[in-house]
Structure formats: structure tokens, C-alpha cells
Amino acid sequence: MSPLATVWKLERHTAAKHQVLRKYLEAWLPIMGMGINSRLVLVDGFCGPGIYEGGEPGSPIIMLNAFLKHQLRERISAELVYLFIDEDAARIEVLREQIEGLGKLPDQVRVHVETARYEDAFGRVLDDLQIRGSNLAPTFAFIDPFGYSDAPMTLTGKFLQFRRCEALIYVPFPDIHRFIERDGQERALNSLFGGNEWKHAKPMRGRARLQFLHDLFKKQLESKCSLDYVRSFQIVAKHGARGYHLFFGTNHPLGLHKMKDAMWSVDPVAGTRFEDSTNIDAPTLFEPEPDLGSLRDALIEHFGPEPFTIDDAMQFTLLETPYRPEHVKTKTLRPLEKDGKLEVVEARAGRKRGTFPDGTRLRFT
């Protein structure tokens, strides 16, 4: 894509990102918008024109439709404030047309479209809140820059310091790998990583360099953005290209749970797949019928012969593995009990074999 292009072809990896974005927001909106929150903010920091050459919707339209076409739309009571940012005026003009094409928006939906750099526009919002001593409403930000030079870690950290804020960030590590030794990259990479530790990757080659950069970005999100939970998801294209990652950051385990649900629910997109790459040495591919052998092994290694509760096993699976808590009971522990490799130490009266109600105490044998 030319840097000056107004509308361009939808690439496979972008379509995959958009499916995850839609699936997650379909879960996030009712959770956050049907309770005590009177306002939600949704930010697309590099929104583009909202449409592709083939007529496919862009990320800002997908974000709007996640609410407009939601089956629980009538029960989502929060005001929804959308902030769409792009520095190209021609793209913004096309986006305005796409939004108008959706028809009259509900009164609870407010859309702000800005021709500006992400760093400037969103930075002004945060600066204003800081000056007024106000809090940012629960916010989800999709940060998918055209390249890697315009999404500073300092701004991401400033935004994620607010409670109940989450981000889905795309990082093209192969591009960084390719240009890291070129002159003129220092400012952009210092901004992206929030410091100059990335320079340690310069003498590295191949996979070692990619892994270092990946792990550094994850570490910086955790430390500089004060995030409790960060997981990365690698897009695996049909031709085998790797290194393109989505990072999800949240401070709530439910957010992590729903993002994992989104990843596991996404069907292959024209040959594109996802794998959990948080532990880059042991990636786990998201498949309809996954091999849960590594989850079984991780549970056995973590708990050993000591008793544990089913709740412990579910939490460990959510926080420390690529798998979902839903993978634990029926697909992992039930076969182990059947084979005599799992003992039920304590359970409520009337428990049926192969079931694990809350509070059940277990032990691997």
C-alpha cells in the first residue's frame, strides 16, 4: 500500500485482525454497557477510510456495527463515544461518507472523526482529562498503525493507566527486523518500545532477533503500562509468513477470557490462522479441535502430586496458558480421571464421575 493511498486492497492478515476485533467487541459491549457504566469510549487510532477496494468494511465501520448489529443492542444502555483518527484528509473524507451510509445513528452513539496524528489527537484527550483531574470512561483502543513509527509506548502507557481501559495493538516485527540497522530508525523505535533497549537486538540475527523484540515489547507493556495481563497472538499467513503479532493488554481477567474466546472462535480467513505466541518458544495454534496434550502436561507439571481445586485449574489455564477455562473439565480432566490418572479428593455429594463442580478438590496420580 502506498503511504498516500486513499483506498486499498484488503489483505488476509488485516481481515483476520478485523474478525478478532469484531468478536471481542461483541463480547465487550454488553459486559461493559449493560451495567453501571454510563459511557464507553472506543478508539481507532489509525482508522483509514473505513472501506477497501472490494467494498469490505474497514475497522471503524466494524467497530460501529459491533453495536448497531448486536443482538443485545436494545439492552446496551451506555453512551458510546467513538474516536476515529487518521492523518490523511482524503481517507477521513471517505470515512465520513461510509459513516453517513450507515443511516441515522442512535442517540446514544457519538462519533468524532479527526484528521490528525494519533499521538496528537488522543494525546490531547488524555492531557485534557489530566488537567481537569477527570477519569477516562472505560475505553477500548484498537492501535493498528501503518508501519511502526506512530504508536508511542508513552501514549499507550498514559492511556492504560486509567482503570478499565484495554488495548489491542498490532506490531509488524518482520518490518522492524528488516530496518533496525538502518540509519534514521532510532526515534521511531525509541518511541515504539519506550526506550532504547531494542538496540540490544542489532547484533542478533533471524529468530533470535524477532524473539527479543517480541519479548521486549511485551515486557514494556507490562511495566510501563501497568498491565496485569498481556498476551500476544501471531498471525500465521497461508504462505507461512510469521512475526506479525496482535498484543492484547488488560487489567481484568474477564477481558483476557473474552479475548481468548474471540481468538478461538475465529475461523481461518483465506488460509490465515492465529496462534498464541505469548511464549514464543511454544506457540499454540487456535484450531476448532485443538490438541490439548500440552494443557494436560502444563497442569500436571504445575500442580504435581499436591491437591488443588477445580477453580485453581481454571484460573491457571486462563492466566498462564494459551487455552480457555472451557478446555479444562470435559476435554482435559475427564479423560485423566477415566484413565486413573486423576483422583477426586473431595467433592459435593452426588457428583457424577467425569464432572467437576466448583470447589471439587483433585490430585494427579
Image (tube, grey):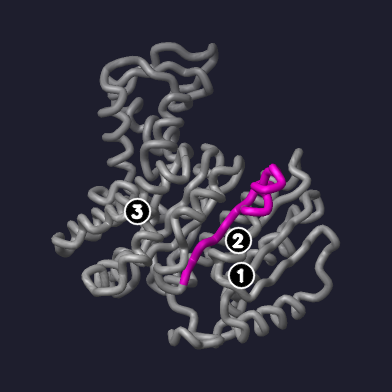
**Quadrant where the C terminus is found in the figure:** top left
Q: Evaluate whether residue 158 shows in this view.
A: yes
Residue 307, position in %: x, y?
Answer: 35, 15
**Disc number lying in front (1 or 2):** 2
Q: Earlier in the sequence, mark 3 or mark 1?
A: 1
Q: Which mark is residue 195?
A: 3
Percent of width and height locating residue 270: 42, 74
Residue position marked by numbered label 2 in the rendering? 122
User: Which amino acid does the dot numbered 2 rest on?
Assistant: Phe
Q: Measure the C-alpha gap from mark 1 to mark 2.
A: 8 Å
Real-space Cα distance between discs 2 and 3?
21 Å
1 or 2: tag closer to the N-terminus = 1
The one of 237 and 225 positioned closer to us in this rendering: 225
Q: Local crowd at mark 1 within 10 Å, few (<14), some, or many (≥20)?
A: many
Q: Would residue 359 appear left or right of 103 to someone viewing this image?
A: left
Q: Quadrant of residue 273?
A: bottom left
Task: Say whether residue 340 is visible.
Answer: no
Q: In the rendered structure, are the residues bearing label 2 and label 3 in contact, judged by CB atoms less than 8 Å apart?
A: no
Label 1 is placed on what type of residue? Ile
Q: On the image, numbered disc 1 is attached to which residue?
A: 85
Secondary structure beneath label 3: loop
The residue located at (49%, 60%) in the rendering is 266
| Residue 185: quadrant of the picture | bottom left
